[in-house]
Amino acid sequence: MDAAGEELERRSKFLNSLIQKKKAVEQEEHHDRLNVRVRACDMPLALQNRAFRCARDLLDSMPGKKLDSKRLALALKKEFDSSYGPAWHCIVGTSFGSYVTHSLGGFLYFSIDKVYILLFKTAVEPLHH
């Protein structure tokens, strides 16, 4: 590669790093607005943001801001099942332990306010008789 090609490659890498930093800052600002903190994740950003927005909207709509963990878990599960196919599972609470197996790209553990949410997908295989 000649000097001009090397310089072009160097500039391209530099610009790409700037873009990635800007995206990371924007994502952090989005989390701050929703009061979200990612605890563990194996999920594309678009799906994460959908989960955060859905959880925030549901929490804000609860009467007297009183947590209904079953309602929140069911709503998130149904949202993800209908949008991304079965089989999504959701656990919501202020204190719980878990150990789960999930499909690749289908795991998100986050907190919003003082509520912890575990959302994950498992593979569905037909029963053979």
Image (tube, helix red, strand yellow):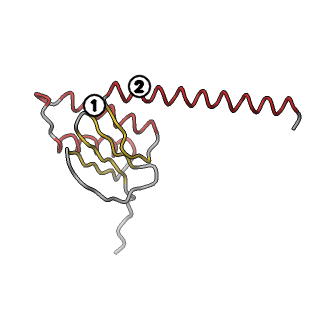
Q: Quadrant of residue 115?
A: top left
Q: Nearer the viewer, residue 30 or 120?
A: 30
Task: Check the image and name the residue furthest to the bottom.
Answer: 129
Q: Which residue is mark 2?
A: 29
Image point (39%, 26%), residue name: 30
From the top left corner, tell me how far across and down residue 102 is, in percent.
Answer: 39, 56
**Residue 56 tag number:** 1
First in residue order: circle 2 vs circle 1: 2
Looking at the rendered structure, the kind of residue marked 1 is: Arg
Name the mark nearer the viewer: 2 or 1.
2
From the top left corner, tell me how far across and down residue 64 is, in percent.
Answer: 10, 27
Image point (28%, 44%), residue name: 117
Q: What is the crowding at mark 1: few (fewer than 14 residues within 10 Å), some, or many (at least 20)?
A: some
Q: Quadrant of residue 97?
A: bottom left
Image point (71%, 30%), residue name: 12
Q: Nearer the viewer, residue 111 or 128?
A: 111
Q: Disc count in the image?
A: 2
Q: Secondary structure at mark 1?
A: helix
Looking at the rendered structure, the kind of residue marked 2 is: Glu
From the top left corner, tell me how far across and down residue 114 is, in percent.
Answer: 22, 37
Image point (24%, 40%), residue name: 75
Which part of the image, by quadrant, shows the N terminus?
top right
**Residue 72 tag number:** none
Which part of the image, by quadrant, shows the C terminus?
bottom left
Task: Check the image and name the residue furthest to the right.
Answer: 2
Whole-number angstrom distance, CA of label 2 to CA of label 1: 15 Å
